[in-house]
Image (cartoon, helix red, strand yellow):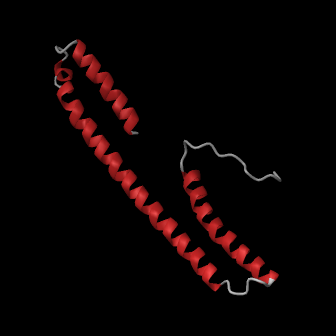
């Protein structure tokens, strides 16, 4: 969205630079840096929020995996090992499902079938 706005504003800036007699377009070059800075600030804020969300999500998954490791005491028993591995895989799978939900919401992202049995 910001890329499209930047492209349009750059085009208007170029047009107004060619012919400053075009009414309000003659005022546009002075506002291009202001609009560009505002767009950059909005994008930075959006990505900072996204980074914070991911950081919280990864920390929560890390804590769950650490708790599973702490509870894994009987390392010699094959059933206990299988249970531990299954629990770790489920924890990581939950994190991956949240990624997939976000990717499927993004309309620009192509969806591919990753099921080898399909």
Residue drawn at (49%, 69%) of the image = 59
Q: Quadrant of residue 37?
A: top left
Residue drawn at (54%, 48%) of the image = 106
Q: Quadrant of the N terminus?
A: top left
Residue drawn at (39%, 51%) of the image = 47
Is 42 situated left or right of 95 in this image?
A: left
Residue 44 at what x, y percent from top left?
34, 48
Residue 112 at what x, y percent from top left?
69, 46
Q: Quadrant of residue 35?
A: top left
Residue drawn at (51%, 65%) of the image = 58
Q: Nearer the viewer, residue 17 or 77?
A: 77
37 w.r.t. 23: above or below = below
Residue 110 at what x, y percent from top left?
62, 42
Number of residue marks: 0
42 w.r.t. 53: above or below = above
77 w.r.t. 5: above or below = below
Is 68 situated left or right of 114 in this image?
A: left
92 w.r.t. 72: above or below = above
Residue 4 at what x, y percent from top left?
39, 33
Is 37 situated left or right of 109 in this image?
A: left
Name the residue furthest front.
76
């Amino acid at each position: 969205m910001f890329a499209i706005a930047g492209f349009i504003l750059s085009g208007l800036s170029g047009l107004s630079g060619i012919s400053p007699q075009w009414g309000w377009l003659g005022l546009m070059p002075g506002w291009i840096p202001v609009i560009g800075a505002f767009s950059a600030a909005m994008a930075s804020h959006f990505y900072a929020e996204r980074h914070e969300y991911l950081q919280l999500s990864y920390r929560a998954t890390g804590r769950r995996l650490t708790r599973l490791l702490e509870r894994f005491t009987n390392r010699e028993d094959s059933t206990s090992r299988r249970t531990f591995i299954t629990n770790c895989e489920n924890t990581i799978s939950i994190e991956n499902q949240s990624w997939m939900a976000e990717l499927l919401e993004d309309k620009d992202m192509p969806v591919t079938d990753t099921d080898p049995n399909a």
